[in-house]
Amino acid sequence: MSPEEILKQYFGYDSFREGQGTIINAILEGRDVLAVMPTGAGKSICYQVPALMLPGITIVISPLISLMQDQVKSLNDNGIHAAYINSSLSDSQISRALTAAANGQYKIIYVAPERLESQEFLDFSRRVHISMVTVDEAHCISQWGQDFRPSYLKIVDFVKGLEHRPILSAFTATATEEVKNDIACILGLKEPRIVVTGFDRENLYYQVENIRRKDDYIVSYIEKHPEDSGIIYCATRKNVDTLQELLFTRGVPVTKYHAGLDNETRKKNQEDFIYDRAPVIVATNAFGMGIDKSNVRYVIHYNMPQSMENYYQEAGRAGRDGEPSTCILLFSAQDIMINKFLLERKDFSGVEPEDVELIRQRDIKRLQVMEGYCRTTGCLRNYILTYFGEKTGVPCDHCGNCHREYREVDLTDAAKSVINCVFETKGRYGLTIVLGILLGANRARLKEIHAETYKTYGVLKDRSEAELRLLISQMIQEGYLHQTEDRYSVLKMGDITPLRDENTRVIIRTYEEKEPARKARSAKRKSTDALTSAGYDLFEKLRALRLAIAREEALPPYIVFSDKTLIDMCTKLPKDRASMLNVSGVGAAKFEKYGQRFLDEIGAFSLQHPEAVTSISEDENSEKQSKIVEL
């Protein structure tokens, strides 16, 4: 079978997405591959399709148990025999799985990196033909990445110990140029085909809210979106517990997840979220990596994350099905202090002592980048893309900042006062002290350094602290000031030459919310927008059937069929096997398991509503409509 035939047969799709075909062809040619693809771009298909075509077994190294379990459930449901080996299995279960794999029962085996050192797994790897080793979440191998895992270094020795070197393929959604090069070097990829499909998730709407009453904002948002599934990330366990309890008392079907819960509770809460028993979850960043829940409609960050990589990855758990979804970051100045506190207590076990300080500096730099994202008045999407090295053009017109009404304020004189203050302090102090001096604050720390004797003490006391923070953030971006990357970063002079020109102006932008809400970028609409009221009724019936099947099979509903597939059924109204296989996401194995029950549901609906129109073409002038025909 060709890659396209396998895609249709097992996954139910007619064509590959951007980059998928290139990656698969490179693997089938025997080449190593490094792919950087955003969440939801279909990374797993890039190694699963060739795994079915290569002669031996594919080993997929994955960091989290939940990721493996989701992937294996999905593969088996598609008619592909796969297994996972991790600490959730007993020794006897692991032995049986390895024996079955050695006998040819499995083409794909997911393993945790720690498992690569076990003698039983090493003996197994010497008895079988391993065609490919796939490294998922490959950024975990780079100590310069935001999520370094020393256990990932075991992959290198494992591959070297194999009698025949397999094809190596590495996949990640978050990698700067530096991390990308690090992955290729550490894994020893040989002349790899490097594919970067881009970081832009067009269906995601980014938004930053600089507010103090975060609880009120979240309660209001959920009340306005009661049918949506969402994730709310908090920086601390205490915030998770408090917010989850608040939402629960408001009648929100909500659960929580953090490392302070016992394993059984975490597992139950995660499953409640995945199975839509509790469509809202409040969690620390310990939750979500590898969660393939496709219908998450919003991700809200209660606190600012520690890095752009973390934010991009966590926000990217929204809209994996390609449907319009929202990513909101609730920012307050206290978030910076919380993150600095957490970074100071970061675990560096497994890291060479000489590298610790350098990693600390990079962590501080990442934190500064995130603060810049929260304070920028420019396009949020372009800020993210620029960080990951992509060229950007005009503002996206599809983010919170692009939909704000700005007014410009000339703060050139204030900027010169800031420069004078940093000069007067000889670059010895950080942002908090500089702000305190400029505002003439009455603080013990300022008295200790005799700040009241400085010429700049209180010169900007008529300005607000928020306005000065915005000004200094912009001056750092424009190079007038430099913020060091030490643990206790200080403000130093940058290139102030342009400010000596009397024609140079320093303009900041402040905003008030604009009221019509959003203009969808690239005319991106929800798939359900094409459904009429009758079509939506059918969609709800199909969702109910999917939920019933999911409970029978002990599977998450989205593994049975995604919302997108159900909507396509409502649009195409299949009447038999051939037309059902023409629905996006319905492969042969899925049809054999579930297809007839969905055909029966659609047929029953048609008998009750013989003249109903279920969908209307996006082109309002088109008369092409899908109708229920009388059976």
Image: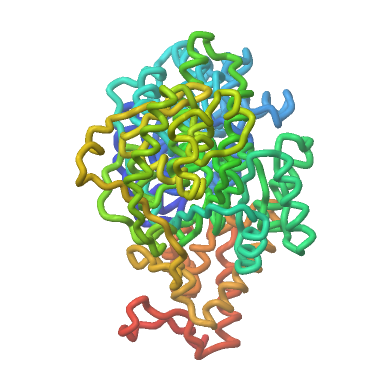
Count how many numbered circles sit on residues in the image. 0
Evaluate whether residue 23 shows in this view.
Answer: no
Q: Position of residue 289 (x, y in %)?
A: 57, 39
Is residue 28 found left or right of 8 in the rendered image?
A: left
Q: Nearer the viewer, residue 383 or 532?
A: 383
* Residue depicted at x 41% and y 40%: 472
Quadrant hosting residue 110: top right
Q: Nearer the viewer, residue 512 or 385?
A: 512
* Residue depicted at x 47% and y 39%: 370
The quarter of the picture where the N terminus appears is top left
* Residue depicted at x 76% and y 63%: 250
Quadrant hosting residue 397: bottom left
Q: Position of residue 242 (x, y in %)?
A: 75, 48
Rendering colour mode? rainbow
Is residue 30 found left or right of 528 in the rendered image?
A: left
Q: Does 368 sit above or below residue 144?
A: below
Q: Position of residue 344 (x, y in %)?
A: 60, 24
Q: Nearer the viewer, residue 360 or 81?
A: 360
Evaluate whether residue 31 shows in this view.
Answer: yes
Q: Position of residue 173 (x, y in %)?
A: 43, 39
* Residue depicted at x 46% and y 26%: 490
Q: Residue furthest bottom?
A: 611
